Image (spheres, rainbow, N blue to C red):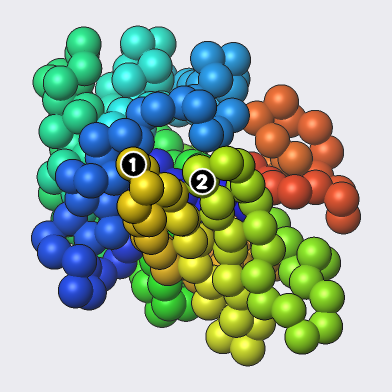
Amino acid sequence: MDSTGDTGDTGDTGDTGEDGYFGESVAAGYDDSSGSEEFRPDVVDATARVLAELAGGGRALELGIGTGRIALPLAARGVPVHGIDMSRAMVARLRAKPGGDAIGVTIGDFAQTRVEGAFSLAYLVFNTIMNLTTQEAQVACFRNAAAHLEPGGCFVIEVAVPELRKLPAGQSAVPFRAGPTRWAFDLYDVATQGMSSNYVEVVDGRGEYRSIPFRYVWPAELDLMAQLAGLRLRERWDGWGRAPFTSESGRHVSVWEKPVA
């Protein structure tokens, strides 16, 4: 499972600098679509189409806006978008794109940072909820999203289902990329729900290694977080095509609603 999300926000910067784990070295190549189907035009279009429908003519708030992979096509559909992100390097890539300077962005931790106004839609896509590496931060994110929503508004998360069925007894690593010069694998700690995505690349005979921490989370756990934030589950799909979510689904798109009354 390639767990890298759309954001430079990890919930805290640790020892990685003000941009968290998504500094300039990551931002510079983030929009290279060769490593993920998430950047395919048909996937981006399907994502923006569903989010535009859920926004219903209102404003949208993207938590972890990153380089604008979804925000820009969503704005092109006429949805006013505002974003929150910790990584100035990622946001600089957004600003450099056509239409990027028209999207408002607030720099900060998306689990806590507040922006003015109410929104009909808040969303986190491409596994970005896992960039928050503690349960406390993930709960805070739900509460922050709910606080921004107007009554009847929706909070949407797209995230992978933890791939623990791929772990035989005594093993903690799941490889997801292998090539002549690039390798990548996830490491799981099933006792804490901690994990990391690890990347090894050989460039001009020199090896480079990068590791990004995450916290994996189950659909039922997300539903409880939503309940604590005053939200209720409205829809859960296998993906943006709205196929039913099943026990064999590798990811889910979940929609929680803020009650009107």
- Mark 2: give few (<14), some (14-19) or many (20+) Cα within 10 Å: some
Q: Residue at x 33, y 41 (%)?
A: 204
User: Compared with residue 145, is residue 221 higher up or lower down, i.e. above or below?
Assistant: below
Q: Mark 1 points at which residue?
A: 204
Query: Left or right of 169: which side holds 127?
Result: left
Measured Cα–Cα span from mark 2 to mark 1: 12 Å
- Residue type at mark 1 is Asp
**Residue 28, position in %: x, y?**
24, 35
**Residue 180, position in %: x, y?**
57, 41
Q: Name the residue under label 2.
A: 182
- Nearer to the camera, 8 or 148: 8
Q: Is residue 258 visible?
A: no
Query: Left or right of 86: which side holds 48?
Result: right
Q: Is residue 205 visible?
A: yes
**Residue 146, position in %: x, y?**
40, 55
Q: Which residue is drawn at 58% across and 59% down?
A: 185
